[in-house]
Amino acid sequence: MTASSHFDRRQFLGGTAATAATAAIG
């Protein structure tokens, strides 16, 4: 796994968490 790939995965998980939080708030 490359560093960029690892970063992309973390960014994806972060985005998913943010979306879930927004949905819960909304």
Image: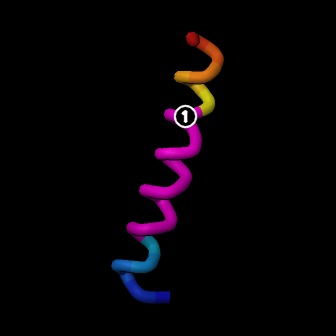
Quarter assignment of residue 2: bottom left
Q: Position of residue 16 (x, y in %)?
A: 57, 44
Farthest residue toward the front? 26
Residue at image coords 50%, 88%? 1
The image shows residue 19 at horizontal and vertical percentages of: 54, 34
Membership of 22 in magenta stretch: no
Query: Magenta region: which residues?
Result: 7-19
Q: Is residue 12 above or below residue 25?
A: below
Tell me the kind of residue under disc 1: Thr
Query: Residue 11 in the image: x percent, y percent?
Result: 43, 56
- Helix, strand or loop for disc 1: helix
Q: Which residue is mark 1?
A: 19
**Most frequent secondary structure within the magenta stretch:** helix
Q: Residue furthest top?
A: 25
Query: In screen coordinates, is 17 left or right of 5?
Result: right
Q: Residue at x 35, y 78 (%)?
A: 4
Relative to 22, residue 6 above or below: below
Q: Is residue 25 above or below residue 21?
A: above
Point 57% across, 12% down: residue = 26
